[in-house]
């Protein structure tokens, strides 16, 4: 099975993070569950490193939500994130779903994935995982979750 870090992260998110907070703290149980699900130890290790980096990089509370400088994407970011992904990040920031610090954290975590390109659905999952990990972002997380799982999400302009 050809899996990526994102595959492992999505499996963790869908099967563990939202259901059992105590299990999330028990890394050995998580690793055993992932191995049993068919993921390689190398990819599991990379996914845990990705999550550790996410936990270590929480932006400071109180960062302004919008009306800041425009983010200019460069080189590898342009290669990995297409126009649709970059536009979606701008939309999230303009709507107050992400602040500048969270946007940078999303970009950092997206760039850390072992994929040459991310599509919009992959980026949405990264945003959801970042918001899940951010204290005080419950409303933004709920909105993002609605966008992903609702049959009739709010239109993105």
Image (spheres, rainbow, N blue to C red):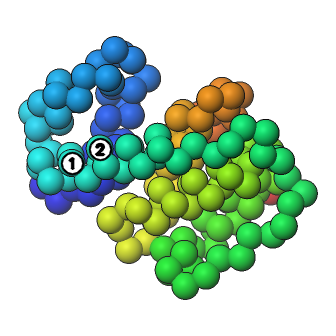
Q: Is residue 71 above or below residue 139?
A: below
Query: Under tag 1, what secondary structure?
Result: helix
**Residue 65 location in percent, x, y?**
82, 47
Q: 147 or 64, which is in the foreground? A: 64
| Residue indicated by mark 1 | 45
Q: Is residue 115 visible?
A: yes
**Residue 126 location in percent, x, y?**
50, 49
Mark 2 in CB contact with mark 1 (< 8 angstroms): yes
Q: In percent of the image, x 38 and y 43: which residue is there?
A: 52
Quarter of the figure with the C terminus: bottom right
**Residue 105 location in percent, x, y?**
57, 54
Q: Which mark is residue 48?
A: 2
Q: In percent of the image, x 53 and y 48: which residue is there?
A: 57
- When asked about the image quadrant of residue 8, the answer is top left
Query: Under tag 2, what secondary structure?
Result: helix
Q: Looking at this rendering, what residue extends furthest in the bottom direction?
A: 75
Q: Is residue 58 above or below residue 88?
A: above
Q: In percent of the image, x 79 and y 39: which residue is there?
A: 62
Q: 50 or 1, which is in the foreground? A: 50
């Amino acid at each position: 099975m050809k899996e990526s870090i994102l595959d492992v992260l999505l499996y963790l998110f869908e099967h563990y993070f939202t259901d059992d907070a105590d299990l999330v703290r028990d890394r050995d149980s998580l690793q055993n569950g992932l191995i049993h699900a068919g993921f390689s130890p190398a990819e599991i290790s990379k996914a845990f490193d990705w999550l550790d980096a996410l936990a270590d990089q929480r932006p400071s509370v109180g960062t302004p939500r919008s009306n800041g400088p425009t983010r200019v994407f460069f080189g590898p970011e342009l290669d990995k994130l297409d126009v649709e992904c970059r536009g979606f990040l701008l939309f999230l920031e303009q709507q107050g779903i992400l602040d500048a610090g969270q946007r940078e954290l999303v970009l950092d975590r997206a760039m850390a994935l072992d994929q040459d390109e991310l599509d919009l659905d992959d980026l949405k999952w990264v945003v959801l995982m970042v918001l899940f990990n951010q204290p005080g972002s419950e409303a933004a997380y709920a909105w993002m979750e609605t966008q992903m799982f609702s049959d009739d999400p709010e239109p993105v302009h």
